[in-house]
Amino acid sequence: MPELPDVEIYRQDIERHALGRKVASAAVDADRMLRGVSASSLRDAVRGRTLDSARRVGKHLLLQLGEGGGWLHVHSGMTGRAVVYGEGDDAPAHARLRLDFEDGGHLAFTSQRKLGEFGLVDAPESFVRDRGLGPDPWEEGFDRKGFRDRLAGRRGSVKSALMNQEVLAGLGNVYVDEILFQAGLHPEIPVTDLDENTLGELHATMVQVLRTAVERGADPGRMPEGWLLPHREDGASCPRCDGTIVKARVSGRSTYRCDRHQEAPG
Ligand SMILES: [Zn+2]
């Protein structure tokens, strides 16, 4: 499932290669991915519109459809991605929504299993409110204190709190495991067991992990050797200590951690 770093890379690609371009037509290949809009009204809403800006809130992508045109909402499921390509290039496989620009180029959103959603929204602010999304960890002004305030007093494990989009929007299974690995915290530690200092350090680790992941194109193959990501395998050696990477289920998700430097709670 694309998480904050992946969606941020899609956003940057779109910003670099698709902004300012006018949409001549659109094609929808998976009606079941449409939310609150029909294929024909979505096509009508984007036709003749220029992509003015590309925003990301958590794992969601929002593209501004010109002055007064509202925003196109894209949420990628599992393997989905955003691809900008030219007239002579091969079209990506499994494109579920394709915007055709007047100049001949395209922007496609793919999804092999037709998971994810497309829709139209009035504004990013109302979208965040309607979805009940928490702050994005990269939001301007969201700092250590804001992070502590969001987590303070929460029930449940630190992993489930960090994955809860109403607490923070953008983190998912893989990056939460990475952050906890680097912070040396067991995924099942109750949030209430973390003191202010530990929460502050956890915030710093989170920001650092997200920044590095985006700098490296959110490409798992390019992450630092000392990270968990290249070693997400049951029984692998921990790249940080003499421990072993173990796999378990936490909050219903496959969770990887080191059995040594991420000690079990209490
Ligand atoms: Zn370790």
Image: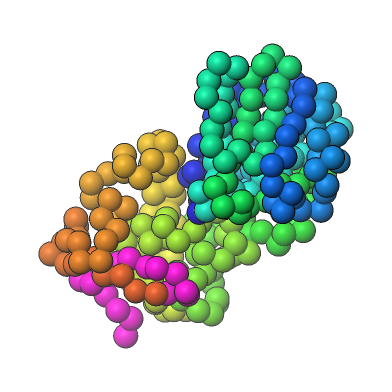
Asked whether the viewer can see residue 177, the reply is: yes
- State left or right for residue 124 relative to residue 7: right
- State left or right for residue 260 relative to residue 75: left
State whether residue 158 is above or below residue 103.
below
Q: Residue 153 location in percent, x, y?
A: 55, 77
Q: How is the image coloured?
A: rainbow
Quarter of the image for residue 194 reads: bottom left
Q: Residue 14 location in percent, x, y?
A: 60, 29
Q: Residue at x 55, y 16 (%)?
A: 88
Q: Residue at x 67, y 38 (%)?
A: 97
- State left or right for residue 225 relative to residue 106: left
Q: Residue 140 location in percent, x, y?
A: 60, 44
Asked whether the viewer can see residue 12, the reply is: no
- State left or right for residue 137 relative to residue 18: left
Instruction: Point out the image quarter for the C terminus.
Output: bottom left
State whether residue 132 is above or below residue 264.
above
Quarter of the image for residue 128 reads: bottom right
Quarter of the image for residue 236 reads: bottom left
Q: Nearer the viewer, residue 105 or 127?
A: 105
- Is 147 covered by the magenta stretch? no
Q: Which residues are magenta?
A: 250-266
Q: Residue at x 50, y 48 (%)?
A: 79
Q: Nearer the viewer, residue 258 or 207?
A: 258
Q: Nearer the viewer, residue 162 or 203?
A: 162
Q: How many marks?
A: 0
Q: Residue at x 34, y 74 (%)?
A: 248
State whether residue 17 is above or below residue 218.
above
- Is 257 covered by the magenta stretch? yes
Q: Residue 45 location in percent, x, y?
A: 84, 35
* Residue at the farthest left position: 242
